[in-house]
Image: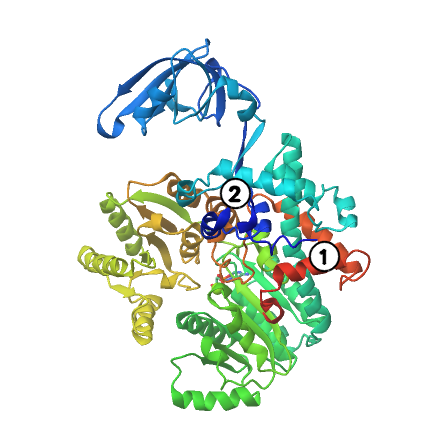
């Protein structure tokens, strides 16, 4: 059988070197297989004619049959257009051209019958169709073929006559010459079990659907295929790790844990925290290495779960470490732990890039000898010189700032692999989590500590600043503190820093009675910490910053988060920022400031923020608005989520189904060697061969 992925598109009749080059560059089509997997993005129903009298607002592409009554040139300059009045006897509609005006009258004649195809626009009380496709009625046979596929094309492709119809012609040529067929990618067993159609049939129907029903079946089959192999890959590496990697066993709940829990814990754990602790304890006692992702909205109390887990490690004579993405955060975690543990005999150390050499020289041997029980730090923890005596648990906070490689370095230097707990406040939609972290076990804290008042969010335009300043003054006079955040977008940093600095000067003028401080990424670490400290201690009432404060900073007395140019932030980031307030018992506020001119999508984004405090709901909305390609984390994930047909935002059920089927197969045949399963193994190898399997070590 011919390898479709090795056969260059250049050999397809009608393509040739020049077009092949454009197809490769513009559409990533290099082989026969690439072409077959170049799917239409929409289909248009040309199986029926609409009447002009039936036309209403918001219709898809439609076709009508009728005659021109007249042609007329209207408007000046950019609104200059040719209008053809068209009727089918039930009404009149305007067909409009803004380009190629001169040709229209030559091409079409009044009185002759045509088929018009296009998308009606509502215009005042009438409808028109801009730049329609028009064919003489005698061509009806050729043009009205049921469902017509539309392929994505670029300007460059169109210039070389590679429009949607040309692509469809290539598909036709290719499918008709493939008389040896397309190799099936699923086993007969899976096909039987799922009731899916064959790959060959699916590919044919996706390009030349015979009916809406057959098209749906083809789409389902191809989506399943795509998601099934991603899941099978993840599940296989998870299974491998579970069977091949031995985990440390922590059987004891000892004095440290119990004393802390009974005598020093200042509040009751929430039910969600209790549940998660149970899950973690079970992992740590199982003999398997724990690889758990802990998701919890900002302020849900993940740090406490981390602390309790570390005490378990210490009870079992192991060390634990906690790694944060920034120094500010590491300092803050350290302070929190010290505060919780002040009366207990647990040795906690802080190790960051700014740890003085002398101090380092004392710390390192104490870590190596096991004298220190818990180390909090930044990247500094993964340097060669840091050797643990017995690292039993590594906790990684806000993992999306850490590369996979950095994570793995923490334990590559140990003889054994410690338990790993990754904590993130970035809510990840379930479908994405299953795909990106499908091999990690997931725990969720879906409950905030009691007594929190939901944050009130409002959207204000930036020409109404005076009211905002009055509001801030009121809050500060009541003893609260305020964050003001400016965007920092790659490529416009210069302007962004200028905006922040100007804002800083302005605020000092407007609020002479208060102390205003500022932090941003360009400052030296020491200066940054000093400014931050002013805010944490309450000396400063207003903190102005770029997004460096996005993650984890905890100042419960701060009740207002003002986000300038909110339209320039993504939803998840806005939610992260908002999570900096609402951490104490007082009512907190988030004010989204934007300019008046907003795109529809942006307006929707800000609306969602105003209406929802639920991180998961927001993440789902983000996924729907932006698609998964943009979501933070997918680029670094290393699994290249290059989905051709499935969508993580709308195909969650198929994804779950594919995962279940994959799991069933692996449960019975983990190495994919029995029956027809080698087909699956071969395809897996082909699909994922070039990707390094980082999941094994992360
Ligand atoms: P996260 O890291 O998930 O954003 P934190 O661990 O920083 O959240 O917790 C936020 C605040 O809530 C902290 O001040 C913490 O002490 C407090 N907190 C945590 N758990 C509880 C609880 N069960 N009851 C009351 N307060 C809690
Ligand atoms: Mg935190």
Q: Residue at x 53, y 62 (%)?
A: 637
Q: Secondary structure at mark 1?
A: helix
Q: Residue at x 22, y 29 (%)?
A: 77
Query: Where residue 249 sits: x, y (%)?
Result: 70, 76
Q: Left or right: where does residue 668 sit relative to residue 602?
A: right
Q: Left or right: where does residue 103 sit relative to residue 579?
A: left
Mark 2 residue's CB less than 8 Å from ligand 2: no
Q: Which residue is mark 2?
A: 14
Label 2, residues with CA under 10 Å away: few <14, some 14-19, many ≥20:
some
State the image quarter where residue 158 is shown.
Answer: top left
Figure quadrant of the C terminus: bottom right
Mark 1 residue's CB less than 8 Å from ligand 1: no
> From this viewpoint, is residue 320 visible?
no
Q: Residue at x 25, y 50 (%)?
A: 469
Q: Which mark is residue 250?
A: none
Q: Which residue is mark 1?
A: 680
Q: Are marks 1 and 2 in contact (CB under 8 Å)?
A: no
Q: Secondary structure at mark 2?
A: loop
> From this viewpoint, is residue 323 visible?
yes
Query: Where residue 189 sits: x, y (%)?
Result: 79, 49
Front residue of 589/209: it is: 209
Q: Left or right: where does residue 259 sit relative to residue 76?
A: right
**Is 189 rendered above or below residue 241?**
above
Query: Where residue 97 sits: x, y (%)?
Result: 34, 26
Q: Nearer the viewer, mark 1 or mark 2?
A: 2
1 or 2: tag closer to the N-terminus? 2
Query: Where residue 588 sits: x, y (%)?
Result: 39, 52
* Mark 1 and mark 2: Cα distance apart in space: 35 Å
Q: Residue at x 39, y 41 (%)?
A: 159
State the image quarter where residue 668 is shown.
Answer: bottom right
Q: Left or right: where does residue 121 sit relative to residue 10?
A: left
């Amino acid at each position: 059988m011919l390898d479709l992925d090795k056969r260059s598109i250049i050999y397809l009749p009608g393509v040739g070197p020049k077009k092949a080059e454009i197809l490769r560059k513009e559409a990533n089509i290099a082989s026969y297989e690439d072409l077959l997997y170049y799917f239409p993005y929409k289909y248009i129903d040309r199986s029926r004619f609409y009447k002009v009298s039936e036309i209403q607002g918001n219709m898809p592409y439609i076709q009508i049959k009728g005659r021109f009554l007249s042609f007329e040139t209207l408007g000046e300059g950019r609104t200059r257009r040719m209008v053809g009045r068209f009727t089918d006897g039930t009404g009149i509609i305007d067909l409009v051209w803004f380009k190629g005006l001169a040709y229209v009258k030559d091409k079409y004649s009044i009185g002759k019958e045509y088929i018009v195809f296009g998308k009606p626009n509502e215009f005042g009380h009438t409808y028109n169709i801009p730049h329609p496709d028009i064919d003489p009625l005698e061509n009806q046979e050729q043009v009205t073929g049921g469902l017509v596929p539309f392929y994505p094309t670029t300007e460059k492709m169109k210039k070389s006559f590679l429009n949607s119809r040309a692509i469809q012609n290539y598909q036709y040529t290719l499918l008709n010459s493939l008389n040896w067929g397309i190799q099936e990618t699923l086993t007969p067993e899976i096909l039987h079990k799922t009731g899916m159609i064959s790959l060959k049939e699916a590919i044919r129907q996706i390009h030349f659907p015979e009916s809406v029903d057959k098209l749906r079946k083809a789409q389902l089959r191809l989506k399943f295929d795509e998601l099934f192999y991603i899941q099978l890959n993840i599940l296989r590496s998870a299974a491998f790790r579970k069977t091949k990697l031995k985990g440390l066993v922590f059987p004891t709940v000892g004095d440290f844990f119990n004393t802390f829990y009974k005598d020093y814990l200042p509040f009751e754990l929430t039910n969600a925290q209790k549940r998660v602790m149970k899950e973690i304890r079970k992992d740590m006692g199982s003999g398997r290495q724990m690889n758990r992702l802990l998701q919890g909205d900002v302020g849900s109390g993940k740090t406490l779960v981390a602390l309790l887990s570390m005490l378990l490690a210490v009870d079992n004579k192991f060390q634990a470490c906690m790694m944060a993405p920034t120094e500010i955060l590491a300092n803050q975690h350290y302070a929190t732990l010290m505060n919780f543990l002040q009366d207990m005999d647990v040795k906690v150390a802080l190790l960051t890039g700014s740890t003085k050499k002398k101090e380092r020289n004392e710390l390192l041997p104490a870590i190596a000898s096991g004298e220190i029980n818990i180390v909090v730090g930044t990247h500094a923890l993964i340097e060669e010189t840091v050797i643990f005596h017995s690292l039993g648990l590594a906790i990684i906070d806000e993992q999306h700032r850490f590369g996979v490689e950095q994570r793995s370095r923490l334990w590559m230097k140990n003889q054994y692999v410690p338990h790993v707990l990754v904590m993130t406040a970035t809510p990840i939609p379930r479908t994405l989590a299953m795909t990106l972290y499908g091999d990690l076990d997931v725990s969720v804290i879906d409950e905030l500590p009691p007594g929190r008042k939901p944050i009130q969010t409002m959207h204000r335009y930036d020409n109404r600043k005076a009211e905002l300043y009055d509001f801030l003054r009121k809050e500060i006079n009541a003893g609260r503190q305020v964050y003001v955040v400016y965007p920092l977008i790659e490529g416009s940093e210069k302007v962004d820093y200028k905006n922040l600095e100007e804002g800083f000067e302005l605020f000092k003028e407007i609020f002479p009675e208060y102390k205003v401080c500022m932090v941003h990424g360009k400052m030296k670490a020491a200066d940054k910490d000093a400014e931050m400290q002013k805010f944490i201690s309450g000396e400063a009432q207003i903190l102005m910053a770029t997004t460096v404060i996005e993650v984890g900073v905890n100042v419960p007395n701060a009740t207002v988060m003002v986000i300038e140019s909110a339209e320039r932030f993504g939803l998840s980031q806005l939610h992260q920022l908002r999570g900096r307030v609402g951490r104490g018992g007082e009512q907190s506020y988030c004010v989204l400031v934007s300019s008046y001119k907003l795109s529809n999508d942006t307006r929707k984004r800000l609306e969602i923020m105003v209406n929802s405090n639920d991180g998961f709901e927001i993440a789902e909305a983000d996924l729907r608005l932006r698609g998964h390609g943009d979501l933070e984390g997918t680029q670094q994930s290393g699994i290249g989520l290059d989905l051709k047909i499935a969508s993580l935002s709308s195909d969650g059920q198929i994804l779950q189904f594919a995962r279940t089927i994959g799991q069933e197969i692996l449960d019975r045949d983990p190495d994919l060697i029995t029956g027809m399963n080698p087909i699956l193994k071969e395809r897996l190898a082909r699909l994922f061969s070039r990707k390094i399997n980082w999941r094994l070590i992360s």
